[in-house]
Image (cartoon, rainbow, N blue to C red):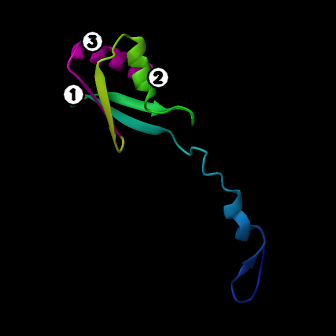
Amino acid sequence: MMGSMDGTFFGIASNMDNFIDTSTKLSHDRYEVYVNGDFVGQKTLLSTREDVTSVNEFLHTQGHNDFLTNLDGDHYHIRTNKKERELKHALQLYLNSR
């Protein structure tokens, strides 16, 4: 890059903003997962196509269908009145295996 005497620069740097891809993840997103207020584990998103709702898909495949979810910042809250202990156990295994 070449500069002038007044401190201004010319060249590539002035157009760098046009080449920044903001859709690329720079680090892994991580969510803390709670069931009925109890911390169960952390869900780390490993790809740009994955999101925290993959937790729901896992729970559905395990036969857990009676729950509500709420995302509050990086806290993912799951509420259930049925089979809480089994749901927590399945979720702990899922979150720790990834």
Q: Is residue 22 above or below residue 3?
A: above
How much space separates mark 1 and mark 2, taking CA atoms?
22 Å
Frontmost residue, 23 versus 97? 23
Mark 1 neighbour density, 10 Å: few (under 14) some (14–19) many (20 or more): some
Where does the image place residue 17, in percent across and percent down from the top left? 66, 63
Question: Does 88 lie within the magenta span?
Answer: yes
Question: At 35% from the left edge and 45% from the top edge, which residue is drawn?
Answer: 73
Q: Is residue 89 above or below residue 55?
A: above
Kind of residue at disc 2: Arg
For the N terminus, the image quarter is bottom right
Frontmost residue, 4 versus 31? 31
Element class at badge 3: helix
Are the residues flagged by discs 2 and 3 in contact, CB closer than 8 Å? no
Residue depth check, mark 1 versus mark 2: number of the one nearer the observer: 1
Element class at badge 1: loop
- Which disc number belongs to residue 36? 1
Residue position marked by numbered label 2 in the rendering: 98
Q: Is residue 94 above or below residue 78?
A: above
- The quarter of the picture where residue 10 lies is bottom right
* Residues shaded magenta: 75-98
Kind of residue at disc 3: Glu
How much space separates mark 1 and mark 3, taking CA atoms?
13 Å
Q: Is residue 41 left or right of residue 28?
A: left
Mark 3 neighbour density, 10 Å: few (under 14) some (14–19) many (20 or more): few
Where does the image place residue 23, in percent across and percent down from the top left? 60, 47
Mark 2 neighbour density, 10 Å: few (under 14) some (14–19) many (20 or more): few
Kind of residue at disc 1: Asn
Residue position marked by numbered label 3 in the rendering: 86
How much space separates mark 2 and mark 3, taking CA atoms?
19 Å
Question: At 43% from the left edge and 29% from the top edge, which residue is drawn?
Answer: 53
Residue depth check, mark 2 versus mark 3: number of the one nearer the observer: 3
